[in-house]
Amino acid sequence: MNNPSRWLLMLALVLAAINLRPGITSFAPLIERIAEALDLSRGLVSLTTALPVLLMGLLAPSAPRLAVRFGLERTIASCLGLIAAALALRVLGDNPVLLIATAAMVGAGIAVAGPLLSGFIKRYFLDRIGKTAAFYSLSMAIGGTIGVVLTAPAVQWLGGRWSWALALWAIPAVLALLIWLRLPNQPEAPSESAAGLPWNQPRAWLVSAYFALQAGLFYALTTWLVARYHEAGFSLTQGNAFFSGFMLIGLPSAFALPWVAQRFGNRHQLMVVCGLVATTSLLLIAWAPQVQPLLVCMLLGIALNGTFSLAMLLPMYEAGSPLAVSRLTAMMLCTGYCLACFSPVLVGLGRDLAGDYRVPFLVLAGMSATMSVLALGLAPPRRAPAG
């Protein structure tokens, strides 16, 4: 099978993207329950989110080198196999060391697969990058959302066995792996093998800083948004409903914004607006959580899912070849996730020190405001007039 059909390539991309988030977001509705069941502090239990995010940053630079050595398609398939194995091991999650180890395995798999999937889009969908990136972002958002929405009902269905509910997410990972094993493995050009990450490019640093703030916000909220509303007097069921709204409403924006950005060439303006919406929403969550909580969470979901999909689109426009896109994406993810991994831990520690979540969420609002400032610098560079 030397020439895979376009539909098989798209199916492989969608299934891989769906599996990049449930291994992390499935902890959100259970984190307080896990902390109590295993007698862990909030700071320690947040490692289930922070550790994979850290590894997603530290290991991202290895992705292009692995693609050169083993081939892009086969490397992605191996990552999906690692994610599937880690999630299956969570059936033994009542062991806290093993639970945190599986989080590290998931992070390692995502770290390598993420940059290479951007290169995969550049290789096979060059004529429709915006539309394909929209489906890619939407698939990641769907994966993250179903990880939140379906995990708590799965616990009830499994008679309260929360570790089994976490392990169920191995099933879609195995399905994705089976599809990727059908794709032919294409070697990279020899001229690409010696290039490194674009550490000396100012715009690469600007892209990376923007992504760091966006990812930090997302993972902090994934870990603590439900807890913030529970502290404000809402039940855990209500808090999970608000968080589900945050995730679900982000699906259309994750799909629509990359398409709009390509159609009208206004991605940096969209990023500024999303940052301002996120800032307003976070200020309300910090100071007035009783004010229309579902609406506020939905606006926040639109803004953050939109900024994520637009951030993932940037390397595809900034770099030329598929491997160059993977390298810029690797730098963006490395810098971004290495910094973002601290946000869930710092919010948890801030809550323990301050006694409530108000101050940590005010800091998150400041981060989203900074995103809007950085977005102004991400406007497409002006081309010099001809002649």
Image (spheres, rainbow, N blue to C red):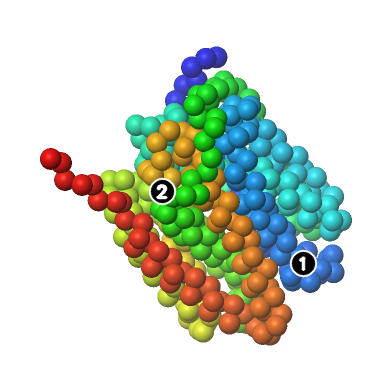
Instruction: Tell me if 344 is positioned left or right of 47 in this view.
Output: left
In-front residue for pair 122/223: 122
Helix, strand or loop status at disc 2: helix
Q: Residues within 10 Å of mark 2 (few under 14, many from 20)?
A: many
Return the residue nearer the eye: 229 or 79.
79
Which residue is under mark 2? 314
Q: Is residue 252 visible?
A: no
**Residue 265 can be seen in this image:** yes
The residue lying at 54 percent from left, 32 percent from top is 194
Question: In what element is the residue under mark 1?
Answer: helix
Q: In the rendered image, which quarter is residue 16 located in?
A: top right
Question: Looking at the image, which is closer to me, 317 or 44?
Answer: 317
Q: How many numbered marks are there?
A: 2
Residue 234 spot, x, y in % from top left: 62, 78
Q: Is residue 225 left or right of residue 210?
A: right
- Residue at (67% x, 33% y) in the render: 78
Q: Residue at x 43, y 45 (%)?
A: 315
| Front of the two marks 1 and 2 | 2
- Give the amino acid at mark 2: Leu
- Cα separation, mark 1 vs mark 2, equals 34 Å
Spot occupied by residue 49 in the image (x, y as percentages of width and height): 68, 59
The residue lying at 65 percent from left, 72 percent from top is 346
Sequence-wise, the earlier of marks 1 and 2 is 1
Residue on which disc 1 sits: 44
Give the side of residue 224 with respect to residue 165, left or right: left
User: Position of 242 compared to 205: left or right?
Assistant: right
Q: Who is closer to the viewer here, 177 or 298?
A: 177
Quarter of the figure with the N terminus = top right
